[in-house]
């Protein structure tokens, strides 16, 4: 520790004399006279950025004050952590100009060699003359680095010299020249054995020996071999005792010099430094005969009076054997210094105390003035930094304070989980790294890191909790020696950031698509599809994909885990229920339903009379077993079934299909039912479990959509499913008697006047033998507009127009290769004619139009299909008919037929 301190405080440089002279300035260079000590303070502003060199002037030359010569010459230089330098010099130092042992002039030159301006060093000279004439017979100056004793070598003035009890009366007789330095014959050191040395030998051993006008000065390092230690009142002391022999021709004169300086006597507590100094230092004094005249203390070589002691919290007490000085740790005259020891942050406190004692030898006027300059440094005090987490979790920002440190510590960098950032980089990233200084000079560092930053690690030990962890290593250094140290910190905050899965879904025409955002907790959840848990087997059926954040799946609309909710003729409505559970806490986290409409024809009606129907098991009929469904004819079973649906395909003249003719269309109807097998309320249910009416609406020409929207249904209500179909009727003209026919591309058909044209009207495609085609009316017009005039009726109410001179003839139809169902055909002929007005042929072309209808052969009573033809052979047909058509049938939407253009051949 002492070595560290030494290094810190003591920076000497080997002198490089620069001859360049510069303007001297003395601001910041402050020499002060403190009795037998001169203190030069050099402000840190001088030393910043350079190496300080101090040279002492001996009157003609400058001598660099080097670490090796300083103790011997009576100098000590200290430097505090901020660069303030103090140079303590004895007024009897090697280079001081001594004027009659009263005025002492110290002149030094301060040089700052900076690397920036290597050729031009900054030089400042300072000179101070201190008056000190209160010399005691013996003055002892104990410094950390040296021990100095000076004794009066001249006899006292005549009036004092003659003292009755004075034994060594030769004092008075000795001339001054005898005790000058050049007459020193030898020096005897007491170690405590006597050791005799010549002056030159002593000087070679590092002793400084000098004669001033009135005094003999001896100075030594505290560790020379002739110095011995002695315990005085429990305090260890270095003792220097030497007798100097001056030799003249006839006489030998002896002078005793002694110094004893304390090397121990300190105790420390966290708050107080106690310094014990023996009150009577035996090696210096005649036992029991001396008297303590004065005791005072000081700091930095400067005496303090009572009120100063009090105000600064110092105290001094004197007991029989000890002087006890108490100094508070942290007092204003000292300073704290940061240190790194074993990678840990420590501090120490330094202060330089002083004690002065004046003794008087009993029965004489011989005074001893004893001064100790005692730099004190506490042991290292560990100050492990504290991490204060001021985080308010709701703000979601870590707020960290690290402290406290002394001002000689700076924060260099911070190591995060992701790497090291310098303070500048951390601030650039928004961490707001700040230094806060207290009035007492201590400081703290703070930073703020948002939870959302990637340096913050997130973990979720439990699904409903999220732990945010910030791990940091603060990289710090102590100035000025740049000792690095670090302090780790781990902060965590756990928040109830419950992760709820977010379920979304969409559909296309055949599938449900479910997406679950699980925030990494996919494995913590249990999924229920419909009523089943999503097992691994099911997962592959449903193309389940899982990544770090999401789970997706696809479920066919026909899947047994989905349900059908309603049917409309062209679509089925379905729903997929999906639940997410927390199996650990047995919590249901989400309850999700995805309802979609899937377009699909449920009942299809073919022109040839084939009906297909899909019976879906809807949610409201849970007991339906699709395979047990039948049509009205119980032998008609599904062509395919599974647990979701049954499909039927049958022709309209089978399976009990009912046929209904309405004015505008024809309906085939059947029912899909499931027999009620259970026994309800004691009686076998007569109501079927399920009844779905399926209908095919055949509209002669136009397709009619009859929308069917299901109401909320009980099981007793019928389900109805309606399809629409188209029945095609065509009218053709035969080339002969119904063997070959004109086709589309043969038009216009050309025929001679009064030649017969053979028409055939046919219900196409249908295989229903129960249908009868009825040709209700036919007429001819001049243009292709069937409503136009002039018009000529050919068939009226299913009978040939009685008014017609060229009356149409209806031909019965019999089965043959081409005609499978004769009732599906009607044939008639007419004689070719042309429209004439006032005996002028209007145009030699005609169009023939018919209205046809489809009737039920078995229900002749309810239709108009089977009205008998009345016969009026006597009626003269007129050439022209009224344009009024038969209003009775006109609103009906019949099968409307028209021939193409028929030309009269010339
Ligand atoms: C200063 O030191 C030099 C060299 O040692 C010496 O020659 C000179 O006399 C000294 N000056 C004084 C005033 O002692
Ligand atoms: C005394 O101490 C100084 C500095 O600590 C050292 O340079 C010197 O060698 C020591 N002398 C002896 C005799 O131990
Ligand atoms: C103590 O010293 C201070 C500063 O030198 C001075 O102002 C004060 O008057 C002195 N007090 C006494 C009691 O001597
Ligand atoms: C300086 O003040 C701060 C805040 O009051 C305190 O925490 C710290 O311990 C003080 N430092 C010293 C060395 O007294
Ligand atoms: C961080 O600062 C410390 C000083 O405390 C230093 O030792 C270390 O090398 C620095 N790290 C980086 C990467 O700069
Ligand atoms: C995980 O899947 C979801 C949904 O398919 C997708 O949006 C996301 O980008 C995927 N994430 C990763 C890391 O692959
Ligand atoms: C009726 O037409 C459908 C579709 O063209 C066909 O699948 C079916 O076999 C036909 N049925 C009959 C009896 O011809």
Image (spheres, rainbow, N blue to C red):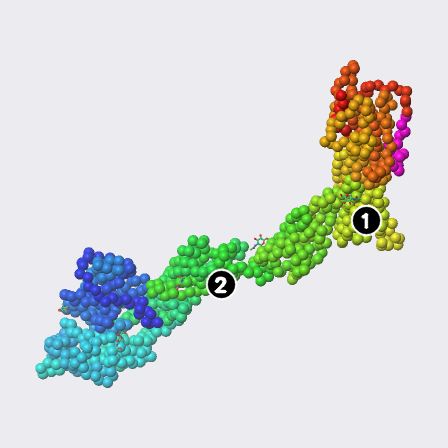
Q: Which residues are magenta?
A: 855-870
The local secondary structure at tag 1 comes to strand
The residue nearer to you, when weighing 98 against 752, is 752
Q: Residue, x 50% and y 58% (percent of image)?
A: 456
Quarter location, residue 181: bottom left
Judge whether residue 186 is colored magenta: no
The residue nearer to you, when weighing 326 against 121, is 121
Q: Residue, x 70% and y 57% (percent of image)?
A: 532
**Distance in Å between CA atoms under marks 1 and 2:** 69 Å
**Residue indicated by mark 1:** 690
- Badge 2 crowding class, 10 Å Cα cut-off, few under 14, some 14 to 19, many 20 or more, is few
CB under 8 Å between discs 1 and 2:
no
The residue nearer to you, when weighing 862 against 48, is 862
- Badge 1 crowding class, 10 Å Cα cut-off, few under 14, some 14 to 19, many 20 or more, is many
Quarter location, residue 173: bottom left
Q: Main secondary structure of the magenta part?
A: loop
The relative height of residue 324 versus residue 424 in the rendered view (above or below) is: below
**Residue indicated by mark 2:** 490
Does 148 sit left or right of 873 as displayed?
Answer: left
Q: Can you give x and y, in whole percent of width and height, for residue 772 in the image?
A: 85, 36
Does 849 sit left or right of 214 as displayed?
Answer: right
Quarter location, residue 217: bottom left
Q: Quadrant of the C terminus?
A: top right
Q: Residue furthest bottom?
A: 193
Q: Can you give x and y, in whole percent of width and height, for residue 151 in the image?
A: 19, 75
The relative height of residue 893 versus residue 627 in the rendered view (above or below) is: above
| Image mark for residue 860 | none
Q: Can you give x and y, in whole percent of width and height, for residue 155 in the image?
A: 14, 76
Residue 625 can be seen in this image: yes
């Amino acid at each position: 520790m002492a070595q560290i301190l030494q290094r810190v405080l003591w920076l000497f440089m080997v002198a490089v004399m620069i001859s360049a002279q510069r303007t001297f300035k003395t601001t910041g260079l402050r020499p002060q006279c403190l009795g037998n000590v001169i203190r030069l303070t050099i402000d840190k502003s001088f030393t910043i950025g350079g190496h300080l060199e101090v040279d002492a002037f001996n009157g003609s030359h400058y001598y660099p004050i080097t670490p090796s010569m300083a103790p011997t010459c009576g100098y000590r230089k200290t430097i505090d952590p901020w660069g303030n330098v103090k140079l303590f010099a004895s007024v009897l130092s090697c280079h001081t100009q001594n004027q009659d042992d009263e005025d002492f002039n110290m002149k030094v030159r301060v040089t700052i060699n900076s690397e920036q301006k290597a050729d031009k060093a900054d030089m400042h000279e300072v000179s101070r003359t201190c008056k000190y004439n209160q010399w005691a017979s013996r003055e002892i100056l104990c410094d950390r680095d040296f021990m100095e004793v000076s004794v009066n070598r001249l006899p006292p003035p005549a009036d004092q010299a003659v003292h009755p009890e004075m034994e060594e009366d030769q004092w008075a007789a000795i001339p001054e020249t005898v005790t000058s330095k050049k007459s020193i014959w030898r020096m005897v050191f007491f170690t405590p054995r006597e050791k005799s040395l010549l002056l030159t030998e002593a000087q070679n051993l590092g002793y400084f020996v000098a004669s001033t006008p009135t005094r003999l000065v001896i100075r030594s390092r505290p560790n020379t071999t002739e110095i011995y230690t002695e315990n005085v009142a429990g305090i260890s002391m270095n003792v220097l005792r030497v007798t100097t022999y001056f030799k003249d021709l006839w006489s030998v004169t002896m002078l005793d010099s002694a110094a004893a300086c304390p090397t121990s006597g300190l105790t420390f507590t966290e708050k107080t430094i106690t310094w014990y100094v023996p009150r009577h230092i035996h090696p210096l004094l005649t036992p029991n005969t001396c008297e303590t005249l004065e005791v005072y203390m000081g700091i930095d070589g400067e005496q303090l009076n009572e009120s100063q002691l009090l105000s600064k919290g110092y105290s001094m007490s004197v007991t029989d054997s000890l002087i006890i000085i108490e100094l508070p740790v942290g007092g204003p005259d000292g300073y704290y210094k940061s240190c790194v020891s074993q990678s840990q942050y420590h501090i120490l406190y330094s202060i330089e105390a002083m004690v002065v004692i004046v003794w008087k030898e009993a029965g004489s006027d011989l005074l001893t003035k004893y001064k100790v300059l005692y730099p004190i440094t506490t042991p290292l005090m560990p100050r492990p930094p504290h991490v204060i987490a001021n985080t308010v979790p709701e703000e979601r920002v870590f707020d960290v304070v690290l402290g406290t440190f002394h001002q000689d510590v700076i924060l260099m960098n911070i190591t995060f989980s992701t790497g090291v950032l310098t303070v500048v980089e951390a601030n650039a990233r928004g961490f707001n790294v700040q230094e806060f200084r207290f009035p007492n000079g201590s400081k703290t560092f703070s930073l703020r890191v948002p939870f959302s930053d990637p340096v913050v690690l997130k973990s979720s030990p439990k699904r409903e909790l999220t732990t945010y962890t910030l791990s940091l290593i603060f990289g710090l250094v102590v100035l000025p020696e740049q000792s690095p140290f670090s302090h780790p910190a781990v902060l965590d905050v756990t928040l109830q950031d419950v992760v709820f899965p977010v379920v979304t879904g969409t559909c296309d025409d055949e599938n449900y698509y479910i997406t679950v955002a699980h925030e990494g907790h996919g494995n913590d959840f249990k999924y229920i599809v419909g009523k089943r848990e999503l097992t691994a087997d099911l997962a592959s059926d449903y193309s389940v994909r899982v990544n770090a954040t999401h789970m997706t799946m696809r479920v066919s609309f026909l899947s047994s885990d989905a349900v059908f909710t309603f049917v409309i003729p062209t679509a089925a409505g379905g729903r997929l229920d999906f639940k997410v559970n927390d199996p650990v806490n047995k919590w249901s986290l989400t309850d999700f339903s995805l309802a979609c409409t899937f377009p699909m024809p449920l009942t299809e009606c073919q022109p040839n009379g084939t009906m297909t129907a899909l019976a879906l098991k809807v949610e409201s009929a849970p007991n339906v077993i699709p395979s047990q469904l039948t049509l009205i004819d119980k032998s008609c079973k599904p062509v395919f079934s599974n647990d979701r649906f049954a499909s039927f395909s049958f022709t309209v003249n089978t399976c009990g299909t009912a046929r209904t003719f309405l004015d505008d269309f024809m309906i085939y109807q059947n029912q899909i039912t499931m027999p009620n097998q259970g026994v309800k309320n004691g009686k076998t249910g007569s109501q079927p479990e399920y009844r779905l009416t399926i209908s095919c609406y055949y509209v002669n020409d136009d397709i009619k959509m009859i929308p069917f929207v299901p109401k909320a249904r009980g099981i007793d209500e019928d389900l109805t499913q309606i399809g629409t179909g188209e029945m095609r009727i065509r009218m053709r003209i035969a080339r002969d008697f119904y063997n070959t026919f004109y086709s589309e591309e043969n038009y216009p058909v050309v025929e001679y006047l009064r030649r017969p044209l053979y028409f055939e009207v046919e219900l196409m495609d249908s295989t229903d033998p129960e249908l009868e085609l009825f040709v209700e009316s036919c007429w001819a017009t001049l243009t292709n507009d069937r409503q136009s005039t002039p018009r000529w009726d050919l068939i009226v109410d299913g009978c040939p127009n009685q008014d017609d001179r060229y009356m149409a003839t209806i031909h019965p139809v019999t089965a043959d290769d081409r005609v499978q169902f004769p009732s599906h055909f009607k044939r008639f002929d007419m004689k070719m004619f042309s429209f004439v007005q006032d005996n002028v042929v209007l145009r030699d072309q005609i169009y023939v139009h018919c209205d046809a209808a489809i009737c039920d052969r078995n229900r002749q009573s309810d239709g108009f299909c089977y009205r008998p033809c009345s016969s009026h052979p006597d009626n003269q047909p007129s050439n022209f008919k009224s344009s009024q058509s038969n209003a009775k049938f006109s609103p009906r939407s019949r099968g409307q037929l028209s021939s193409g253009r028929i030309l009269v051949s010339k």
